[in-house]
Image (cartoon, rainbow, N blue to C red):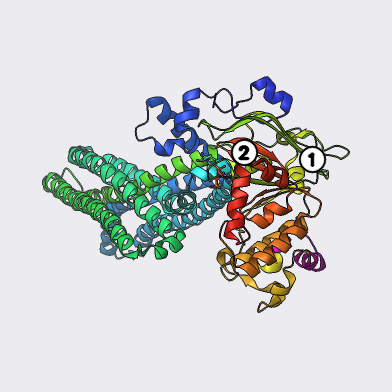
Amino acid sequence: MSQRHEATPSEARRRGLRRANPARPAEFRTRVHGVGAEDVLEYTNDERAHVRRRSWRLLAELARPVRGALALTLVLVLVSNAARAALPMLIAWAIDWGLPQAVEHVEAGDSPAPVLLAVGGAYAGAAVVAGGLLAWYLWLTARASQRMLLDLRLRVFRHTQRLSLEFHETYTSGRVISRQTSDLEALRELLDQGVSSLVSGALFMVFTAASILLLDPLSFGVLCVAFVPVALLVRWYRRRSEDVYRRSRVSSARSIVHFVETMTGMRAVQAFRRQKANDERYRELATEYRDDMVESLNLFGVLQTSLVAIGNLTVVAMLVVGGFRVLDGQLAVGVLVALLLAGRRVFQPMEMLAMFYSSLQSATAALEKVSGLLEQEPTVLEAERPVPLPGAAPGEGVASGRIEFADAEFGYGAGKTVLPRFDLTIPAGQTVAVVGQTGAGKSTLVKLIARFYDVSAGSLTLDGVELRELATADLRRNVVMVTQEAFLFSGSIAENIAFGRPGASEAEIQAAARAVGAHEFILGLPEGYDTDVSKRGGRLSAGQRQLVSFARAFLADPAVLILDEATSSLDLPSERLVQAGLERLLGSRTALIIAHRLSTVEIADRVLVVHDGRIVEDGSPAELVAAGGRFAAMHAAWEESMGRG
Ligand SMILES: Nc1ncnc2c1ncn2[C@@H]1O[C@H](COP(=O)(O)OP(=O)(O)OP(=O)(O)O)[C@@H](O)[C@H]1O
């Protein structure tokens, strides 16, 4: 019974709702769909395929606008590496052909210059081509990768903002921050240098090995033998480093979460003197991360030195095999020199490949997570074909403010029902105080009216129009919620008030501030309306912040105002100030106030007492006091605390 109401396809079409892909198998929607994959430690094959597919799809989408540049890069990488790999062959040619020719010319009394120029020119040409193309493709990849990253950064930001409150309440801001920072950083590292280095390194190895085969098949045989221990070594490194890498991701994530939690909860940290305990915990986590990193560097050290040793041994083996044949006259000296050079160089990219292997791993993990976040759909969907408010075009209506819940029910996600079936009508212009114990469901009730969530069943209408069928513009224009925390964005006071109605003139902003009684204190600030509020409005008192958010709401001039009254007790003068501001803000609009103060309840036309998700009392304050129920008891307690009893 507490299942979230899922619209059937035909129902969704009728309502004009945009649905997620219905063809997607159910298990994907529950386990690895969206950010769900982050909590799954072991994927099944299908799940892994799904996550891979969505990562590749994202990469392909990002690459599409720069595909021309990427194709050109590939050509440049190919040619430049072929030219680089050809250098030892040119040396062989210089020694075996150029040198004897030059000697012949000298002996015949001619100048050896043409021969030397030809040999030197060919070498210089190949080197310039290799170097020039390298510079060109590095420039191209940097531009292409930065463009892909910009695109991704904007997508992540846009998408995260669009996701419903339901998502943000469970997916902490720490996780969103790490998607936008460390994950994008991992992708940047790979796209900036990693991919071109990987491709270029692999190609260079292939071309160099091919040049060895061309020069001397026997030496190529030696190389093949050397590749056996290299393959074993790389396999060992891959396995071990994957383990260590996974551990380091966990330990790094843990220390980031602890860091973010400490910083965002600084007030609680200081109030409860948690600094020392936090320091210790952070030290533990950071040390764990350090240990993992040291282990991974050690592994790489083993790989690197082993590769160098194998490379040197291979060169020695080639020298022995080739040297005897040179003595026998079966192999030219130049070819031997070229083989030794190529043999020395063939293993070099392996080290680089191994180094980029871990950045490839972190980029893959990052891509999986970011693509998951982007796959997440908002639960509160925009109506595809919005229904207009009576007497207006969609997006332009001004509601009278009548709210009606009919046979409505609500539960968070698939959790238990928080508000069992109920009916509630709030006529336009009524001021309703919602009271009740903590956890009773007051915030839940008002969040439905602000459409932070949709009712799980039944209907909720504004002026007779289903809330989920309203154009977003109509909803935002007519329903405004002022939250308890009175959040201020960084910027000036005037800008903060203007959020209520973008484009409002200075005079309108000041008029709104005057209306709620905020004008005086704002003028008293260092720069008046231009005063920059620091993060989270730290410079203003709680009461002042509330007045600014009242002014913002006043400027927005909604038909329906929802207010979660701050529980923190203001001192009496500020409470009076806020109360006066509140009364002016309410005016003649429909208002729902989660009330914690007697003064607020007293100005309400109607009080709803919520208990265990049900409206158990409903009437004017006087009626409810007279009825002698829960509200009467609350009222008596309030009066007593005010010394009025
Ligand atoms: N995002 C959420 N996900 C799941 N359950 C939730 C969520 N928010 C609230 N609840 C649950 O819904 C119930 C009602 O919570 P609600 O916040 O509406 O209570 P409230 O009356 O506003 O309480 P308070 O006065 O303490 O703010 C509680 O049992 C709470 O645990």
Q: Position of residue 402 (x, y in %)?
A: 79, 40
Q: Quadrant of the C terminus?
A: bottom right
Q: Position of residue 480 (x, y in %)?
A: 71, 50
Q: Is residue 500 visible?
A: no
Q: Residue at x 53, y 43 (%)?
A: 439
Circle number at residue 588: none
The residue at which mark 1 appears reads as: 427
Few, some or many residues within 10 Å of mark 2 (<14, 14–19, 20+)? many
Q: Position of residue 26 (x, y in %)?
A: 50, 23
Q: Which type of secondary structure does the marked residue at label 2 adopt?
A: loop
Q: Residue at x 75, y 66 (%)?
A: 513
Q: Tags 1 and 2 in contact by the CB under 8 Å rule?
A: no
Q: Quadrant of the N terminus?
A: top right
Magenta segment boundaries in residue numbering:
497-514
Q: Position of residue 445 (x, y in %)?
A: 63, 40
The type of residue carrying mark 2 is: Tyr
Residue 342 vs residue 44: left or right? left
User: Residue 115 occupies which quadrant of the picture?
Assistant: bottom left
Of the two numbered discs 1 and 2 on the same chain, state the one appearing first in sequence: 1
Q: Is residue 301 above or below residue 8?
A: below
The residue at which mark 2 appears reads as: 453
Q: Which type of secondary structure does the marked residue at label 1 adopt?
A: loop
Extreme-front residue of the structure: 645
